[in-house]
């Protein structure tokens, strides 16, 4: 079983940008905080120093996490996607039978999900129900607000 995690080009770039920012800007800020706290004297009872060290530990943990993610990251070639069925990285236009509204979602990996941008995770309740379905199918999904019926109107890239 592979440990690869698939991303859109945009999602992968966001990870790279965050890693760069953490390594360049944030490391300098934390180092400065540690230096300023050291200047205040006794380190054994210096809350600012302890807080700065804790911030450094969190920062380095996040950097390590991002480096691991990037090591296993792969970009999906969207030209190879099949739009006959809903799959990861396909756009799905849906009609909500409960509200009679039409929405469009891009199905993405969990860490790229952002509902305000129309990106839902394939592991979300809606994402799970849509995977493998075709245009015209109606799925019933249990969401926190109750059950909803969604009809697949269109699948695209």
Image: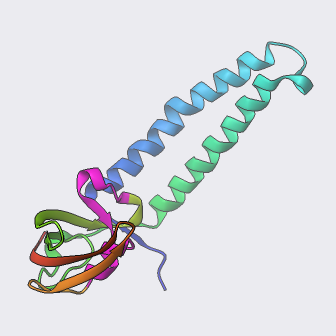
Question: Which portion, as a residue range, is magenta?
Answer: 112-131
Residue at left 25%, top 80%? 130
Image: 74 above or below 113? below
Does residue 62 sit above or below 74 in this rendering? above
**Is the C terminus in the top left, top right, bottom left or bottom right quadrant?**
bottom left
Residue at 34% across, 79% down: 128
Colour scheme of the rendered structure: rainbow
Near-viewer residue (140 or 72): 140
Q: Is residue 63 magenta?
A: no
| Residue 101 x, y percent position in the rendering | 12, 63
Q: Which quadrant of the structure image shows residue 86?
A: bottom left
- Residue 70 picture location, percent across and down: 45, 59
Q: Position of residue 132 (x, y in %)?
A: 24, 87
Q: Is residue 8 left or right of residue 151?
A: right
The part of the image, by quadrant, that contains residue 59 is top right
Q: Residue furthest top?
A: 40
In percent of width and height, residue 94 lies at 14, 71
> Is 16 situated above or below 34?
below
| Numbered-mark total | 0
Q: Is residue 113 magenta?
A: yes
| Nearer to us in this view, 78 or 144 | 144
Q: Residue at x 56, y 55 (%)?
A: 65
* For residue 107, side relative to residue 2 (left or right): left
């Amino acid at each position: 079983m592979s440990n690869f995690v698939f991303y859109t080009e945009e999602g992968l770039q966001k990870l790279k940008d965050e890693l760069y920012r953490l390594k360049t800007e944030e490391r300098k800020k934390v180092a400065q905080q540690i230096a300023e706290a050291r200047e205040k004297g006794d380190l054994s009872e210096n809350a600012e120093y302890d807080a700065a060290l804790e911030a450094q530990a969190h920062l380095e943990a996040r950097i390590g996490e991002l480096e691991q993610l990037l090591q296993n990251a792969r970009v999906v070639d969207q030209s190879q996607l099949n739009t006959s069925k809903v799959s990861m990285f396909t756009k799905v236009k849906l009609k909500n039978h409960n509200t009679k509204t039409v929405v469009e979602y891009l199905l993405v990996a969990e860490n790229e999900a952002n509902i305000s941008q129309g990106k839902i995770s394939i592991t979300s309740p809606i994402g799970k129900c849509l995977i493998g379905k075709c245009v015209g199918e109606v799925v019933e999904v249990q969401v926190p607000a109750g059950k909803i019926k969604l009809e697949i109107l269109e699948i695209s890239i």
